[in-house]
Image: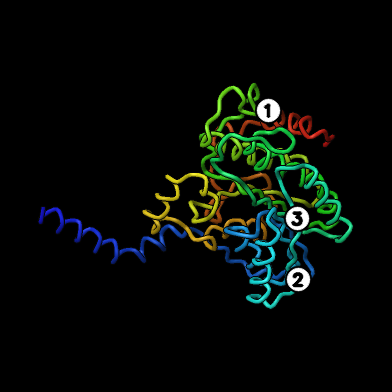
Amino acid sequence: MLVTLGLLTSFFSFLYVVAPSIRKFFAGGVCRTNVQLPGKVVVITGANTGIGKETARELASRGARVYIACRDVLKGESAASEIRVDTKNSQVLVRKLDLSDTKSIRAFAEAFLEEEKQLHILINNAGVMMCPYSKTADGFETHLGVNHLGHFLLTYLLLERLKVSAPARVVNVSSVVHHIGKIRFHDLQSEKRYSRGFAYCHSKLANILFTRELAKRLQGTGVTTYAVHPGVVRSELVRHSSLLCLLWRLFSPFVKTAREGAQTSLHCALAEGLEPLSGKYFSDCKRTWVSPRARNNKTAERLWNVSCELLGIRWE
């Protein structure tokens, strides 16, 4: 017993000593560009908390006019107030956007287009993870509806404004778990079989396929698009899984902060010279590999067409 206790004490003492080095290693890449954004307009979904909030803070600090588009407006106003104080930028605005309801998405887009004549950066950051089975207001499985279809529709509605503001960028937050995902066209709404974990993975694969097909269709417009893996980040995203919440606490030295998790989104939104890499997938501020399924052009095109059908839109 004493030997075991001694070994455990030594182990945790060792972890304490090396923790700073571990944190530095797992912090990942850093957005190093000094690009400033006076006069630029940015929309970030889900920016009332986590990665989105830190992304909004950094872009506001560079002088951008930042729209926090979120479902919880009170939480959004709290985040915006904090960012305004931190950055001395009064142009941090909050607008209601519920990605689980296409009426809300259309209402947000209509109001934004009336308010703003330009849009330079759209960051599709919001998401849900490992939710119990449920459907959106329009009858879509929640992960598919919020993480993919909601952002698909929002991008469609704002695209012309991005084009007239070119050069402009669209950043889609995906995840490394797309490697486990699969687009199950025969059961997109997971009505025959449902797994909370796999549903999230499928939606993250959809984000990358959307980015790939969008880049192809945007060639020559001056609008480019990128998918990103933010890393394993300490955020509210895991709130539906008590197991993940516990693991995040136990392995906190290996988990990124929200600020660290925002770096790749910032890199793809700001870094000079990324235009030739439109449609690609980034992690730790570097282009990285995607799964074979994420490189399948036929699947990307089919998902695009099916998404348009589900949303009742024509997007050529």
Whichever of callouts 1 and 3 sits on the residue coming sooner in the sequence is: 3
Whichever of callouts 3 and 2 sits on the residue coming sooner in the sequence is: 2
Q: Residue 36 location, x and y as percent?
A: 70, 70
Dots 1, 3 in contact, CB < 8 A: no
Which of the 4 quarters of the picture holds residue 308? top right
**Residue displayed at 81% across by 50% down:** 158
Whichever of callouts 1 and 2 sits on the residue coming sooner in the sequence is: 2
As drawn, 315 above or below 110? above
Horizontally, is 18 left or right of 175 in the view? left
For the residues labelled 3 and 2, the Cα–Cα distance comes to 16 Å
Pointer 2: residues within 10 angstroms few (<14), some, or many (20+)? some
Give the residue type that dot 3 points to. Lys
**Residue displayed at 66% across by 76% down:** 85
Q: Which label sits in the foreground, 3 or 2? A: 3
Give the residue type that dot 2 points to. Gln
Pointer 3: residues within 10 angstroms few (<14), some, or many (20+)? some
Count how many numbered circles sit on residues in the image.
3
| Residue assigned mark 1 | 298
- Given residues 182 and 146, the one toward you in this image is 146
At numbered mark 1, what does the secondary structure look like: helix, strand or loop? Answer: helix
| Residue assigned mark 3 | 96
- Given residues 241 and 119, the one toward you in this image is 241
Q: Which label sits in the foreground, 1 or 2? A: 2
Give the residue type that dot 1 points to. Lys
Q: Residue 198 location, x and y as percent?
A: 53, 34
The quarter of the image holding the C terminus is top right
The numbered disc on residue 91 is: 2
As drawn, 71 above or below 205? below
